[in-house]
Image (cartoon, helix red, strand yellow):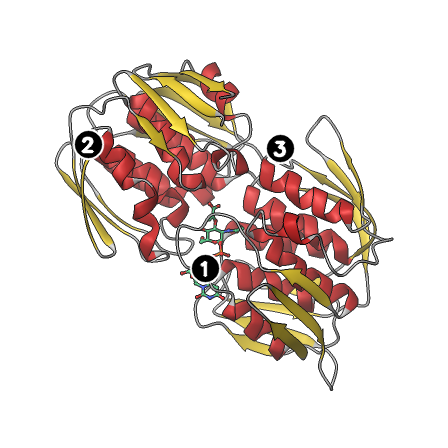
Amino acid sequence: MARYEIHGGNPLNGTVTISGAKNAAVAILPAALLVSGKCRIENVPDISDVRIMMDILAGMGAKILSAPDGAVEIDCSNVQCTRPDRELVRKMRASYYLMGALLGRFGKAHVALPGGCNFASRPIDQHIKGFLALGAEVDETADYVALSPGEEGLRGSRISLDMASVGATVNIMLAATLIPGQTVIENAAKEPHIVDLANFLNTMGARITGAGTDTVKIRGVNSLKGGTYAIIPDQIEAGTYMAAVAAAGGNVLVQNVIPKHMECITSKLREMGARVINYDDSIRIIRTGKLRQTTVKTRPYPGFPTDMQAQVCVCMALAGGVSRLTESVYETRFFGYCTELESMGASIWINGKTATITGVDRLYGATVCAHDLRAGAALVIAGLAAEGTTFVEHIHFIERGYENLVQKLTALGADIRRLDN
Ligand code: EPU
């Protein structure tokens, strides 16, 4: 199985360009099912989750053309299939967006339950609650979800989510865009990719307001037409490179970012002693002295992202003093990487939702295993900062979400290579 070999200890210097946002791309590609005509989507990251989503859509009859500049042309006009390939759907989490998109376009869907990173129990009851409120009949088994119009047909509705779920907000937006009447999502998620999806749909003719606030309103329209849209830069990829510089030291210009999306991460890394300078669409991060301890609690946007929990934990592991890291989105997320970090010399004590991390002077190379995407990214960062050689196994998780990781890090001076076995 492929793995990374990392010889740690090199500071990172130079410029890295951030790719399009994974979690926006995996929502916007299935959203193209709602469009009559061709969409040109720019800044699509070349990562395995996106490739799987494109394979699913192509298997359903979408015409897809990938240009070398990262743009994807997708035309779903001829799609008739409402039952996407089960094996492909099970390979990734965001394939559940096919439920909302197919319900919106055809009024029915038969979609296997998704796979993806299993770092916690990840129920979809809020998605189902939304579909039911929109008038769908839902047949949910341990294997799949089948949706069809209920007796009174599909129509806009008011849905108050029990928690600000990203996935449920996206799925309801997808389902509601083409159905009659107004849908109001209360306690909606506010993540940047929710806004990006709304901007994509509105560019194609949808009537969505309030994305980025906790109330999203969707006024159903009859059809969407084709157009061109560019996906936003990936907040978490940018944060991962910033954390890598904080942990390994160096001076890096992170370009193609939206600094506003990075505020929470930036302020924590500053608190820890990194120097961070914001420009219009780039951020310079410099770390020379020793990092200082801090306290982080993950929260939905605009709070500190759960998807940066593991990466900041590595910084804490190398900081002076005792740091506290509390996870409030997915309780079990520590288990994907803390034991691996301990095998590299980190000192971490987990009590329920909180990890207490006592900083050490250095981490040491070891053979470690990625258990999910962000946990894997954190182990790469630990390897870059560690003394000696680290092998990171199960890198297929990491390749779900980081485009050209090895090339980007190598260009910054890291000693990392991908071994095929
Ligand atoms: N939840 C429910 N019921 C639901 C939906 C969510 O109880 O029906 C709970 C979850 O168990 C969790 C919380 O609500 O405790 C938030 O879950 P959310 O639905 O917001 O997460 P998601 O849509 O499954 C997306 C990202 C994740 C990211 C989370 C939180 C995508 C494709 N995935 O997941 O990204 O961690 O939001 O920000 O957008 C990653 O990129 O590595 C990743 C895991």
Identify the image quadrant of residue 239: top left
**How far across and down, in percent of the image, does residue 325 sit?**
24, 47
Read off the residue under disc 2: 319
Q: Amino acid at mark 3?
A: Asp
| N-terminal label among 3 and 1 | 3
Q: Are marks 2 and 3 in contact (CB under 8 Å)?
A: no
Question: Above or below — where is 386 with respect to 215?
Answer: above
Secondary structure found at label 1: loop
Residue at x 73% of width, y 86% of height: 151
Residue at x 30% of width, y 53% of height: 327
| N-terminal label among 2 and 3 | 3
Question: Above or below — where is 415 with respect to 231?
Answer: above
From mark 2 to mark 3, how far is it between C-alphas?
Answer: 34 Å
Read off the residue under disc 1: 122
From mark 3 to mark 1, how far is it between C-alphas?
Answer: 25 Å
Front-lying residue, 405 or 190:
405
Identify the image quadrant of residue 293: top left
Read off the residue under disc 3: 46
Residue at x 51% of width, y 34% of height: 396
Q: Amino acid at mark 1?
A: Arg
